[in-house]
């Protein structure tokens, strides 16, 4: 089946909370096409979240286990075009017979049926024929069936028969896993902090995430040198906005306070409570190392203190980093977050 792309498999479809239901339903359908209550299986979600990949993976998995099954993958758009052509060429019967002979039909992006009443009618009949014969229908869409505008009610009601499962934006951990998989597939290794930087900053679309990675990998072979975080930031300027944002004392204060779960305004207060003092000293230390502010400015910012207080804070933090492993880990963590921004 030339329509199936062998590169889209379950094996390279990373599982996460974002896709667990859709993925496992897809897997069940692939094991028993037409034989589950997930018929049709409708996978829906925004652009670049993995609908086509998953739909193709189902088709490839069926072909792998049951090579004799007739599986067709077709985009809704192409289906519409074929229909128009068959009208023109008087080959409607061939067109319908071709699809009705399938064991599995995978139709991608059915939201594109909107406004195309005649094609919807034809598909309605094909759908009924296949469904009544126990054949499997798999659909993808950018919206849930109930939110699909411009589709005929009777077709929509069919789409709601089986299971609709959505794809969400992957969480950070899943995004990192997707990037790592991609990186290993291409045989190039990038430092962990570069992967984390990309995963942190591209958080709305898997296709863009991969695009950034592809761009980095391509540039790294061109440059024949290892890519570190600074170089990656430079290379990804077009993918990631605001890369050169200056780190401010406000931002440091916010990060540190979030990290230790202390109220932001407390570090500027006179309190000597241990955890507040710690947050204040670390904020001062990071302000000294990550901003161009003078000791005097830093002291003034953190509650009107003088420059010797800042020197003392920095000294204390440096000592603790030397002697206290846990403390050192805290500071490293926060520093990592600072660099990500
Ligand atoms: P959609 O059809 O929803 O617009 P695609 O299926 O084309 O999205 O996915 C965009 C890209 O992201 C593809 O290269 C796909 O392989 C990749 N992708 C999406 N989700 C995953 C995932 N969970 N694991 C691995 N790759 C993924
Ligand atoms: Mg798609």
Image (cartoon, helix red, strand yellow):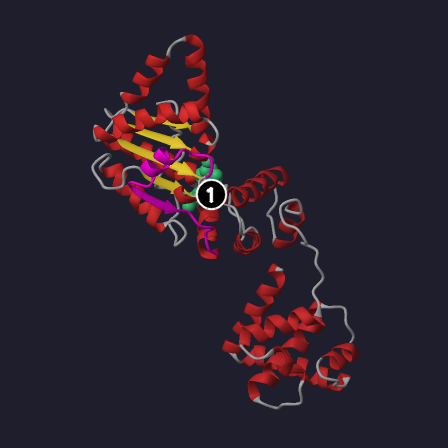
Q: Describe the element under mark 1 as helix, strand or loop.
A: helix
Seen in the picture, residue 114 relative to 300 is either above or below; the reply is: above
Which residue is most to the front? 153
Seen in the picture, residue 15 relative to 109 is either above or below; the reply is: below
Residue 242: percent from left, percent from top: 68, 54
Magenta stretch in the rendered image: 149-171
Disc 1 C-beta below 8 A from ligand 1: yes
Query: What residue is shown at x 35% (from left), y 16% (from top)?
Result: 95
Residue 87: percent from left, percent from top: 42, 13
Query: What residue is shown at x 64% (from left), y 51% (from top)?
Result: 233
Foreground residue among 110 and 179: 110
Residue 268 showing in the rendered view: yes
Q: Is residue 206 left or right of residue 57?
A: right
Query: What residue is shown at x 63% (from left), y 46% (from top)?
Result: 236
Based on the picture, tell me whether residue 195 belongs to the magenta stretch. Answer: no
Q: Which residue is mark 1?
A: 182
């Amino acid at each position: 089946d030339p329509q199936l792309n062998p590169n889209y498999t379950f094996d390279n479809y990373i599982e996460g909370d974002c896709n667990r239901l859709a993925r496992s339903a897809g897997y069940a359908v692939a094991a028993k096409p037409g034989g589950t209550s997930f018929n049709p299986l409708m996978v829906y979600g925004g652009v670049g979240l993995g609908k086509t990949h998953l739909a193709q993976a189902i088709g490839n998995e069926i072909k792998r286990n049951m090579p004799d099954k007739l599986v067709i993958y077709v985009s809704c758009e192409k289906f519409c075009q074929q229909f128009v052509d068959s009208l023109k060429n008087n080959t409607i019967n061939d067109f319908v017979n071709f699809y009705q002979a399938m064991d599995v039909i995978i139709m991608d992006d059915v939201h594109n049926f909107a406004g195309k009443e005649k094609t919807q009618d034809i598909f309605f009949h094909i759908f009924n024929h296949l469904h009544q014969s126990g054949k499997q229908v798999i659909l993808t869409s950018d919206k849930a069936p109930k939110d699909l505008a411009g589709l005929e009610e009777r077709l929509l009601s069919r789409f709601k028969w089986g299971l609709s499962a959505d794809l969400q934006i992957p969480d950070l951990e899943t995004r990192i896993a997707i990037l790592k998989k991609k990186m290993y597939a291409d045989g190039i290794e990038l430092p962990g902090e570069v992967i984390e930087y990309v995963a942190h900053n591209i958080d709305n679309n898997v296709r863009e995430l991969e695009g950034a990675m592809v761009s980095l990998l391509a540039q790294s072979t061109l440059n024949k040198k290892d890519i570190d975080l600074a170089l990656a930031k430079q290379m990804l300027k077009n993918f990631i906005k605001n890369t050169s944002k200056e780190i401010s004392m406000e931002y440091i204060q916010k990060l540190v306070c979030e990290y230790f779960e202390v109220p932001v305004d407390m570090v500027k207060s006179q309190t000597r409570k241990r955890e507040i003092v710690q947050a204040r000293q670390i904020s001062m230390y990071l302000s000294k190392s990550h901003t161009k502010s003078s000791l005097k400015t830093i002291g003034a910012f953190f509650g009107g203190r003088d420059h010797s207080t800042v020197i003392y804070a920095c000294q204390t933090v440096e000592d603790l980093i030397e002697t206290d492993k846990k403390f050192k880990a805290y500071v490293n963590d926060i520093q990592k977050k600072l660099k990500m921004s």
